[in-house]
Amino acid sequence: MKFEIKRCVLGVCVALALLPVAASASVVVSGTRVVYPASEKEVIVSLRNEGTTPTLVQSWIDKGGPQVRPGSEAVPFVITPPITRIEPKRGQSIRVTATGLSGVPKDRESAFWFNVLEIPPRSKSADGQGQNQVQVAFRSKIKLFYRPEGLPGKPAEAARALRWTLVKDPQGYALRATNSAVYHVSLGDVSITLAGKAYSNKEGGMIEPLKSYDFPLKGLTSTAGGGEITYSWINDYGSGVTQTASLGL
């Protein structure tokens, strides 16, 4: 019985592999993040279809859960239009308007995710009939930061003022970055050099306002001596900035 089940599953996988895939991703989102200042009535996110066929696109905002369905989370934003068709080599402006902000903190920045789901059209055969094929929907997501008015300091200052310490973790040690500012700080590569040897974490992470984030360091088993930290942070324009710091500062 087990052999028959395995043979059946294998047959299904082979059959799916032989079916043509509908398309590749063609819709491009401008930028890698959206910053929404509270002083603005709305912000615009630009999409462009770089493909050769029309594409149906659905956009929505959520809080970043892995299994969240479009529109299933209550967020203080309205998107217009939520669903649109974009012609080949044409663009579409998506308007994001803040509404119902009573539950959003006024004393710090808040983070959300702007999602784009691209559904390519079904291909047709020479006689105009739809073919048996695997339809692939492509989902992109970028961060959306809502920034209340009157916040102290600047986002760049928050990234430069991170306080770094070494903490014990199950695998050895981790670099802990503490963010004392009211802005989010998104980091790329993080490394520390101890006794002439570099230990790094290339996974990156986002540090929330007034919180800490640990970056595990593979292979580090001793903390003897001081060390220099090098890290890259991402500014409002999506560009990476390299920074150095010392432990405990």
Image: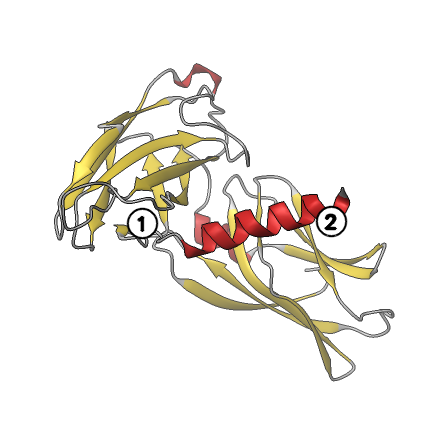
Secondary structure, mark 1, is: loop
Q: Label for residue 216? A: none
Res. 164 image quadrant: bottom right
Labels 1, 2: front one:
2
Q: 244 left or right of 84?
A: right
Measuring 54% from the left and 47% from the top, which residue is drawn there? 12
Res. 234 image quadrant: bottom left
Let me know if residue 29 appears in the view: no
**Mark 1 and mark 2: span between their CA atoms?**
32 Å
Measuring 43% from the left and 22% from the top, which residue is drawn there? 75
Q: Which residue is identified by label 1? A: 22
Q: Which residue is identified by label 2? A: 3
Indicate the quadrant containing the N terminus: top left, top right, bottom left or bottom right: top right
Q: Is residue 100 above or below residue 51?
A: above
Residue 223, horizontal then vertical, whole percent: 84, 69
Residue 247, horizontal then vertical, whole percent: 72, 64
Which one is nearer the viewer's eye here, 9 or 86? 9
* Of the image marks 1 and 2, the number of the one nearer the N terminus: 2
Measuring 60% from the left and 59% from the top, which residue is drawn there? 203
Q: How many marks?
A: 2
Q: What is the three-letter code of the residue carrying label 2? A: Phe
Let me know if residue 43 appears in the view: yes
Q: What is the crowding at mark 2: few (fewer than 14 residues within 10 Å), some, or many (at least 20)?
A: few
Residue 15, horizontal then vertical, whole percent: 47, 51
Which one is nearer the viewer's eye here, 63 or 109? 63
Q: What is the three-letter code of the residue carrying label 1? A: Ala
